[in-house]
Amino acid sequence: MPLVAIVGLAIVSDFMGFPGGAKLKLSGILLGLMLAVVLLGGAPAALIGMLTIAVGWFRSREPPPNLAVNLVTHAWFPLVSGIFFHATTHWLHAGPHDPVFYFLVMPTFVLGMVINFIGVAGYMCYVDRMPFMRRVREAFLPVLAAELFSAVLITAAVFVVLKTGTIGIVILAVVLVIFQYLVGELLKSQHRASELKRRATTDELTGLANREHFTSVVEQRIAAAKLTGGSFAVMLIDLDRFKEINDTLGHHYGDVVLRDLGPRLAACVGSNGMVARLGGDEFAVLPDVRSDEPAVLDGVATRLLECVRQPIVVDELTLGIGASIGISRFPLDGEDVHDMLRRADVAMYSAKENHASYRLYETALDRYSLRRFTVLSDFRRALETEQFVIHYQPIVAIGGQEVRGAEALVRWEHPVLGMVPPNDFIPIAEQTGLIAPLTHYVLERAIADCKRWRQQGRPLSVAVNLSVRDLLDLDLPHQVAGVLAAAGLDPDALHLEVTESMIMSDPDRALDTVSRLRELGVQISVDDFGTGYSSLSNLKRLPINELKIDRSFISSLPHDESDVIIVGSTINLGHDLRLKVVAEGVEDEITLRRLQKLGCDLAQGYYFGRPLPSQEFLRMVDRLDPRPRPALTVVAAPR
């Protein structure tokens, strides 16, 4: 009868088990087995342990390797515990009438608990490739107090059973089951509270701290620094080209990049620092070094940039990204966390737009930040008052160096700020949705210039760069047709340029828009070719006329044989697809000669001339090629 009661207690306790931390299951089976160890011996307890695991398998259906480990462990630890208990009581000549007998129950319980944990957790560590001590911290330490209380409880249970017999085992079984249920509910409540706290302070995608947690930690460090007179820095990281990955390949790829990058940054910063994801592709860093020395912070920023620039492989596609970092220092740049983050943000945008990788905050940058705000505020007024102007740069046929056209760059003649470069307002226009009216503005001006040139006897064509918003606008072909009709210009005189990333953002919709534009007779060029993640299957579907090789490949032609191979292959690809090929960024004669050998059709760059207003551009064309020529190609871009 005692055997049946103990078996029942062990099986019921196992069925009432609940998930613990680190993938381990918690149950009261240890109580039943330890009772069997003391009352029946190690061998019977081992058999009860194996029987309990076998019965429990019909409910859990765990994989065979896990079942084997559990069977061995639940046979081994009762057997070892039984040998220890009975050998020790025999050696001390202790029986149920001696206090020492009951005192030995506690170390026996602890021994069995440790052997059980080592067996099960050790196997899980092997499977998960997790350090054993980490498993101890996550799964063992949180329940240690409850297990030690169970050791006291089992000692009392042994005393009661030995004094009352079988009826005591039954009563004890009921009490232990109720106790296990209450402990289980308590641990579940603690686990839920811990999980809620984790979610409140953790970014779900990357596992890093979130904005609230980062702000709290920085506030604590500020309070400590005020007491000790210390200093430290906060860094903001914004990824470069991340939007292009999202738009081109999809958000799945972007999420994989962020998940990969988060732990990498945390490892780079170290356990004494902190990395948080503030949202999107923006991260905040609290370095592990507490210093405001520029040389020290430069070293930290350099390590972070190297970490970000490591290639990330997603579905056999290798992605490369960069980053811009802004740095603010306490107490030099701010007395509270909000000032520090705001000024790090100002420094970061300055670094991004000046291609400086990272930058320390300085008060002069506040004027830069005010300039950005002024640019945004005055943008619509600039369109209405025609403050935007177009400058043209020649495009030349490589064979005979005849001028065939030009690329036009939009500039902003601000009444207060002076000449505002494209990098200061194009990104703002794209982010705020103002790029569409700017594109329409450039279309009207470029087509008007083209019409005027043709009336003067120069049969030129004109092209306008489109943004991704323009390309996905279903009304764009209608707008283009209207502008051409109003100016009285033949559609084949207009070239529209798109980029690889724009095509890949929505290939089907891009194909529809480009096809409708081609039906109008408009020419289509793919700009900055080679810098995106285009698919040749999508490229060959598009009715395009021209490829423009990005300047990043052209500028290194004189000294980089790898780029010579890439450019040559791109030219051959374009010709195989019956496309014209233009090389951007030609700045010297050596580059021009290499392109001529590779069979490139057209070239542009400072070697031929810098962008100039319309009338000055025409005078430059006359100097470069005074003879009358057939139709030229003029490129206008809202950049």
Image: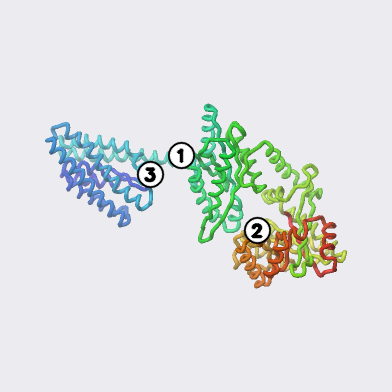
Dot 1 or dot 2, earlier in sequence = 1
Report x, y in % for residue 515: 68, 67
Between the C-alphas of marks 1 and 2, the distance is 48 Å
Q: Amino acid at mark 1?
A: Lys
Residue at the disc numbered 2:
552
Q: Are marks 2 and 3 in contact (CB under 8 Å)?
A: no
Comparing 389 with 433, the one in front is: 389
The dot on residue 259 is: none
Residue with the most extreme top position = 227
Q: Secondary structure at mark 3?
A: helix
Identity of the residue drawn at 87% across and 64% down: 455
Report x, y in % for residue 437: 74, 53
Comparing 288 with 137, the one in front is: 288
Residue at the disc numbered 1:
197
Residue 27 position (above or below residue 606): above
Identity of the residue drawn at 61% across and 53% down: 241
Q: Nearer the viewer, mark 1 or mark 2?
A: 2
Residue at the disc numbered 3:
134
Between the C-alphas of marks 1 and 3, the distance is 20 Å
Report x, y in % for residue 15: 29, 47
Q: Quadrant of residue 96?
A: top left
Where is the N terminus found, in terms of image quarters?
top left
Q: Secondary structure at mark 2?
A: helix
Q: Residues within 10 Å of mark 3 (few under 14, many from 20)?
A: few
